[in-house]
Amino acid sequence: MNTADQYLKAIYLIQQIEDGPASTGDLADRLDVSPASANEMIGKLEDQGLAEHEKYKGVTLSDEGIVRARDALQNYCIIERFLVEVLEVEEFRGEARQLESVIDETVAERLDTIIDRDPKCPDCFDPEDDVCGLLEVPAAVDD
């Protein structure tokens, strides 16, 4: 998953939580980047037709942006579930965040054969707790 996909996933999740556009500040906070970096990437996503940004309102995803965001979220769920269910990693959230930028779709598909992903994925993801809803883990604590 590349950086653009991480932004798309984050925008998608914020839109679910807010039931509306994602603010630049919320996006920067979620990705632990500066608002300037978030604005720069939003511009790139707009140029690619993946997002639309309205000043003072926030950013929304295009239909193509939503498809890519859901694919990225599905891969992220696969990584989380693999770390918990197969490797039994306790601090899986931090590991999953690091791995999501280097694991491509081919590797995610291979991990998927091991965890036997639920058909409702990525709708299983709980954006409030920032975790796959199919995992039985305590609620998120600030890392």
Image (tube, rainbow, N blue to C red):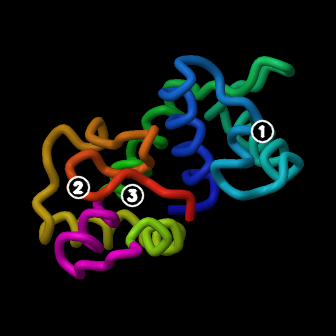
Between 44 and 122, the one lying in front of the other is 122
User: In terms of image quadrants, where is residue 96?
Assistant: bottom left
Q: Amino acid at mark 3?
A: Tyr
Q: Amino acid at mark 1?
A: Gly
Mark found first going from the N terminus, 1 or 2? 1
Q: Indicate left or right for 134 with 102 as reference.
A: left
User: Which residue is at 84% across, 20% downward?
Assistant: 56
Callout 1 secondary element: helix
Q: Which residue is mark 3?
A: 76
Callout 3 secondary element: helix
Q: Is residue 86 magenta?
A: yes
* Mark 3, other Cα within 10 Å: few <14 / some 14–19 / many ≥20: many
Q: Indicate left or right for 116 with 29 as reference.
A: left
* Mark 2, other Cα within 10 Å: few <14 / some 14–19 / many ≥20: some
User: Which residue is at 74% across, 47% downward?
Assistant: 28
Whether the residues at callouts 3 and 2 have beta carbons within 8 Å, the answer is: no
Q: Which residue is mark 2?
A: 135
Q: How far is the residue under mark 1 from the one under mark 2?
A: 29 Å
Q: Position of residue 38 (x, y in %)?
A: 78, 47
Vertical placement of residue 31 versus 93, above or below: above
Q: Amino acid at mark 2?
A: Leu
Q: How far is the residue under mark 3 from the one under mark 1?
A: 23 Å
In the image, which disc is placed on residue 25?
Answer: 1
User: Which residue is at 33% across, 76% downward?
Assistant: 90
Q: Quadrant of the C terminus?
A: bottom right
The magenta span reads 78-91
Callout 2 secondary element: loop
